[in-house]
Image (cartoon, rainbow, N blue to C red):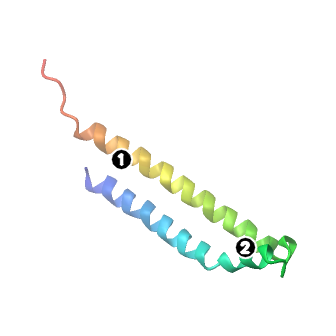
Amino acid sequence: MTQDIQSLLNEQHSIILDREAKLKNYDYIGVKIAMGVSKKSDYAEEIAQTEQWRQDINAAQARIAELEAEASEDAEPTPAE
């Protein structure tokens, strides 16, 4: 695995960790809505933000899969002719 690919993988993993931490800070919203203390409309902006973070996580996971596939292709020995 090249250093460039490793750097890109690290970047994507950092994005995932960051977004997951942010999502955890918003867990209380779901609890309040589930308990009937608040309505979804009370937290519309926050909910929209969490959806964006989930999309960021999904995109980073897809990019990691691409990078890992690329790294494994690079690591495969070429057949001797």
Gap in Å between the C-alphas at discs 2 and 1?
34 Å
In the drawing, what numbered circle is on residue 12? Answer: none
Q: Quadrant of residue 77?
A: top left
Q: Nearer the viewer, residue 4 or 49?
A: 49
* Residue on which disc 2 sits: 30
The residue drawn where x is 33% and y is 53% is 5
Q: Nearer the viewer, residue 32 or 53?
A: 32
Q: Farthest left residue?
A: 80
Q: Quadrant of residue 8?
A: bottom left
The residue drawn where x is 67% and y is 68% is 50
In the image, which is nearer the foreground, mark 2 or mark 1? 2
Q: Amino acid at mark 1?
A: Glu
Residue 4 is left or right of residue 49, and the answer is left
Q: Secondary structure at mark 2?
A: helix
Indicate the position of residue 70 as horizontal and vertical percent values. 35, 41
Indicate the position of residue 18 as horizontal and vertical percent values. 51, 72
Q: Nearer the viewer, residue 73 or 54?
A: 54
Residue 22 versus residue 67 in the image, above or below: below
